[in-house]
Image (cartoon, helix red, strand yellow):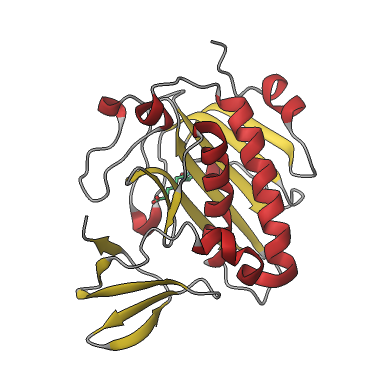
Amino acid sequence: MLDSLAPEHVEPLFQGGFGLPYRYEASCESTQRLLDRNAPEGAVAACDEQTAGRGRLGREWEAPAGRALLVSILLRPPPDRRVAELSLVGGIAVALTVEGALGLSAQIKWPNDVMVNRRKVAGLLAEASEGTVVVGIGLNVNQTRGELPQDGRVPAGSLLTTDAVERERAPLLAVLVFELERAYKLWQAGGLAELYEELGSRDFLRGRRITIEGNSGLAIGVDRSGRLEVELDGERRLIESGDVVYQR
Ligand code: BTN
């Protein structure tokens, strides 16, 4: 199987307006650092291996060379909008890409994970600076079980561990970029309300017992502003951001 993310294999597959300019490096510190902030909206960077891949909350993001999609996309959202919503917009794009590949449903675990069969197959990181937002996506594609992180917080999976099929990453990348453009344009036009059906129907935490910042309660679900509604001590609260531990 030819599995290359080099421009000659990826660029012809892009549809729509996002994708170009496309920057590819075999190895880089982090794709979050590869994009020129002056590049046009929709510019994409990808690599096969990151030497300092970044996760949320200062964590590391690790994947063996050539097995995952490690991608960053440059956006210029309207200045008055919440950047945190873009993790959910990206999550919808990833979930649809994964569903198309696997023929199985995927869920979005607020605020930035994509789950299949209760395992995290992708994580998203939205970083803002100088009017731009770089959305970074790590999607586990061809990792075997032994190649996945075993930190125990959220069990990890890949597309390969889900259905035992090894996949080329270039077509997945093209679909992901296309889906991100579609979801982003809807969000630009009308916010998360425009995507609420797609998000609400894939809400992983809805109805689960959770703990957030030491408080335990029930997750009601992600609301139309992208906040997590929870019931803690009989009181409803909207959580802006945080690390959720859920009961399996
Ligand atoms: C998380 O789940 O904590 C978010 C992980 C985001 C990882 C991706 S991989 C591509 C991009 N480059 C990085 O250094 N991080 C993001």
In which image quadrant can residue 215 be found? bottom left
Give residue 151's position: percent from left, percent from top: 22, 43
- The one of 2 and 109 positioned closer to us in this rendering: 109
- Quarter of the rendering occupied by the C terminus: bottom left
Q: How many marks?
A: 0
Give residue 188's position: percent from left, percent from top: 72, 66
Give residue 40's position: percent from left, percent from top: 77, 50
Residue at 31% x, 40% y: name it.
Answer: 156
In which image quadrant can residue 243 be found? bottom left
Is residue 170 at least partly visible in the picture? yes
Q: Is residue 135 left or right of residue 131?
A: left
From what the image shows, is residue 176 above or below residue 143?
below
Q: Is residue 103 left or right of residue 179?
A: left
Residue at 51% x, 22% y: name it.
Answer: 167
Residue at 36% x, 37% y: name it.
Answer: 62
Residue pushed farthest right?
A: 17
From what the image shows, is residue 59 above or below residue 34?
below
Give residue 205's position: percent from left, percent from top: 35, 63
Residue at 43% x, 31% y: name it.
Answer: 159
- The one of 75 and 226 positioned closer to us in this rendering: 226
Residue pushed farthest bottom?
A: 235
- Quarter of the rendering occupied by the N terminus: top right
- The one of 179 and 64 positioned closer to us in this rendering: 179
Residue pushed farthest top?
A: 1
Is residue 75 at least partly visible in the picture? no
- The one of 24 and 157 positioned closer to us in this rendering: 157
In which image quadrant can residue 234 be found? bottom left
Q: Is residue 206 left or right of residue 149?
A: right
